[in-house]
Image (spheres, grey):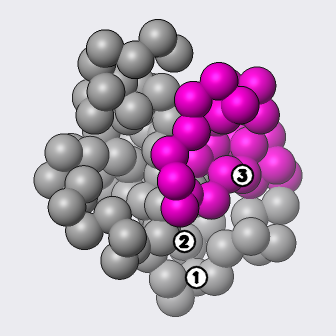
Amino acid sequence: MKKYYKGISILEIEPKRSDIKIIDIRRPLEIKIFSLEGIRAIPMGELLSSPGKYLKKDTTYYLLCRTGRRTTMMTVYLRKMGYDAVNLEGGIKALYPEADL
């Protein structure tokens, strides 16, 4: 798994968030409860079944979920398929620990 894993702390990318492509892979209900402006939402199930419908292999995508667990698995999966995916470690909880997610 380590061979295909790539991650960065969400706190490191926060200042340049508007300049990068972030994908929130949480379920629609989770996004309805709490979402971040300017971030594209693609539920994990949809991304798993049809990554080519949403992603290009020559673009870097930063994956976001609540805590970083789902994006860890998704990052490995996408990188094995040739996509440049990066896990945002810690997820939304690292940015907003007080948020009731």
**In terms of sequence position, does the residue under pointer 2 or pointer 1 come before the other?**
1
Residue occupying the point 71% across, 31% down = 32
Residue 100 screen position, x and y as percent: 47, 11
Asked whether 95 or 27 is in front, the reply is 95
Say what amino acid the circle numbered 2 marks: Tyr
Residue furthest to the bottom: 58
Say what amino acid the circle numbered 1 marks: Lys
Residue 95 screen position, x and y as percent: 28, 34
Residue 29 screen position, x and y as percent: 76, 25
Label 1 neighbourhood size at 10 Å, few (<14), some (14-19), many (20+)? some
Element class at badge 1: loop
Residue occupying the point 56% across, 39% down = 35
Q: Label 2, on which residue?
A: 83
Element class at badge 3: loop
Q: Label 1, on which residue?
A: 57
Residue occupying the point 34% across, 46% down = 88
**In terms of sequence position, does the residue under pointer 3 or pointer 1 come before the other?**
3
Q: Which residues are magenta?
A: 24-49
Q: Does residue 10 appear in the picture of this structure?
A: yes
Question: What is the C-alpha distance between the residues marked 3 and 1?
Answer: 17 Å
Asked whether 82 or 95 is in front, the reply is 95
Element class at badge 2: loop
Judged left or right of residue 33, residue 66 is left
